[in-house]
Image (cartoon, grey):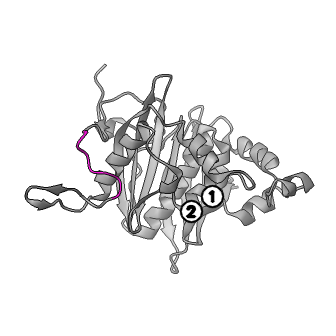
Amino acid sequence: MRLTTDRHRAGWALVLLATGTFVVAGCDSSRPGPSGAGTTTEGGPAPAQTLRQAADAFLADLGEGQVTPAQFTASFLKAIARPKGDAEADAREYLAHFKGARFFILEETTFGNAVVVRGRAESPNRKDAFSLRLVNDGGYKLDWLHRSERMGMNIKAPADPELAAAQDAVRNFLDVLLGGDLRLAHALMTLDWKKKIARANDADVREGYDYSPGFLTQTTKAWRGEYVGYSLSKNELNAAKDGATFLAEFEAGGMKTPYFIKATKTGGQWLVEAFDKQQPPG
């Protein structure tokens, strides 16, 4: 079947194993390396690698199993690792889920020093959506990566880079929440919120957690419910540019349910700190 990249046909909801012709990322064996330093040609040094070129190269390396934990940002490595586990071993185990995959880019967004690409990942026994965020901080680093059965589409990035960064975090949270990878959803929640929802017991503390991951999993599983899609209809950044609010509409059985989502910037990272179902008036 011939696929299409026409965004007007994708709809507002989620892509679930979507079919279409996508831009293939990183298939050229002469691609620049992920370091962003460029290459030398007979005419002199090549231009510096762009963020999109870095994303293409990174995806190709990811599928070939050439990405290492050393290429993670500290915040993403922490998100993947268990509190008292071997962070590098946990990261290598996570990367193994992407080895052998081919990646097709549907959407590209840039803000600040970051590039985000979303699209479809195809493995021999698995087809789903992916999201990748790279940041350039003296070299390209992996700042977020996931595969999910769900992916929000046709969601325009705000012009303000901080609001765009906040929205990216919210989209990742919603995609992995509805896609069922609840541990990743937890990584995108503020610690204070997790502790409020799921107080740690003695066993959790011994494992290095400040909250109860088991109870939090049950709570977030209930949030997921039977929803199959969502849209983001409103977004707003506060004056200090360290807080943002969003209005999402979740879809199930032909019905739409509004949710209020609040994100905050803490330690240089945007995280979700509130997710509340809106009650109908009256």
Q: Main secondary structure of the magenta part?
A: loop
Numbered circle sitting on residue 74: 2
> Element type at marker 1?
helix
Q: Is residue 219 visible?
A: yes
Q: Which numbered marker is on residue 78?
A: 1
- Which residue is found at the position 67% from the left and 63% from the top? 190
Instruction: Please name the residue shown 26% across and 58% down the image.
Output: 49
**Magenta region: which residues?**
29-35
Binning the other alpha carbons within 10 Å of mark 1 as few (below 14), some (14 to 19) or many (20 upward) gives some
- What type is the residue that disc 1 sits on? Lys
Q: Position of residue 279 (x, y in %)?
A: 69, 53
Percent position of residue 5, x then y: 29, 36
Horizontal side of residue 182 vs 102, given as left or right: right
Q: Is residue 125 magenta?
A: no
Q: Position of residue 278 (x, y in %)?
A: 66, 54
Q: CA distance from mark 2 to mark 1?
A: 6 Å
Can I make out residue 260 in this image? no
Amino acid type, label 2:
Ala
Dot 2 falls on a residue whose secondary structure is helix
Instruction: Identify whether 213 is placed above or below 102.
Output: below
Query: Vertical placement of 138 versus 254: above or below?
Result: below
Q: Are marks 2 and 1 in contact (CB under 8 Å)?
A: yes
